[in-house]
Amino acid sequence: MRSNLEIIYKIIVFLAILFVAFLISCNDVNYNYMSGTLTDMVTGEPIANAKVEFEITEIVSGSFYSAFSPFKETYTDEQGNYLIEFESRNFVKMKMIFAKDDFHTVSTIFDPEGVGYDYVVDEIIPKESYISFKIHNSVPYSNDDVLKLRILNINEDCDVCAGSDYRYFYGDLVDTVIVCKVVGGESVTVNYISIHDDIPNIVENQVYCTPSDTVMYNCYY
């Protein structure tokens, strides 16, 4: 009888050990951490209470979905810092999006580094501002008229802002409006060349980009 009790006791102990080992294995989850600091592109000051969104693409049940889907989100603290903790998964691509009122939204896409990797993604964000160009070909005009318009001296760190390449407008009846993103609090150079009867006319002006506002600029030629 005693021998049977010892056997039963050993079986119970063995099962208990297996159960504990199972619980430990279930809780042995790898986590990644995403952290960084968000600052103003012009002043370098930290941006508090900005929304930080973490999106991913991944393979689910053998199928790859190329569109990014929301995964985690948080907000920056008073020092512009943020922290996101997430369980390691087989992501294909990762994207961080930073947004705040009166600022242009910026994002960055990168590849995952592996299980348990800690990511540091610091970002700069430009104050929101726009230039609205009213482009109008005045009388007298001809079908051969050309306007070349570009913006120079835009902050090189602003990936969401307008580029410095010329935009072309051809013909006689040109009457349109285009709006370009620029960095609030900085000045840019507006350069345009109009061509009438093969004679070019060059105009160049400095424009201050008012934060959280749209600057109106007339290109009459």
Image (cartoon, rainbow, N blue to C red):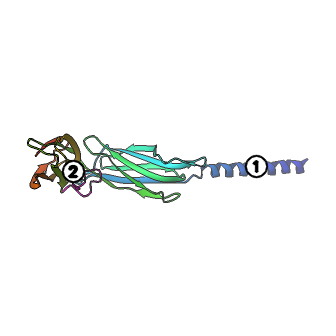
Residue sitting at 43 percent across and 53 percent down?
A: 34
**Crowd band around label 2 with a 10 angstrom C-alpha radius: few (<14), some (14–19), many (20+):** few
List the single residue furthest toward the right. Answer: 1
Report the Cα–Cα distance between label 1 and label 2: 78 Å
Marking on residue 168: 2
Which residues fall within the magenta stretch? 153-169
Between disc 1 and disc 2, whose residue precedes?
1
Left/right of residue 121 with respect to residue 43 in the rendered view? right
Tell me the element at label 1: helix
Mark closer to the observer (1, 2): 2
Image position, residue 39 (x, y; %): 28, 52
Query: Label 2 is placed on what type of residue?
Result: Tyr
Q: Relative to residue 179, is residue 151 depicted above or below?
A: below
**What percent of the width, then of the height, locates residue 2?**
89, 49
Q: Where does label 1 land, which residue?
A: 15
Q: Is residue 212 magenta?
A: no
Q: Residue at x 43, y 49 (%)?
A: 84
Is 168 magenta? The answer is yes
Query: What's the mark number on residue 70?
Result: none
Q: Is residue 76 visible?
A: no
Residue 55 % position (x, y):
44, 47
Q: Position of residue 206 (x, y in %)?
A: 10, 52
Relative to the observer, which residue lies in front, 86 or 145?
A: 145
Numbered label tally: 2
Displayed quadrant of residue 217: top left
Secondary structure under the numbered disc 2 in the rendered image = strand
* Magenta residues, dominant SS class: loop
What residue appears at the point 65 percent right and 48 percent down from the top-left corner? 23
Q: Can the viewer see residue 180?
A: yes
Q: Residues within 10 Å of mark 1 (few under 14, many from 20)?
A: few
Task: Look at label 1 and name its amino acid.
Answer: Leu
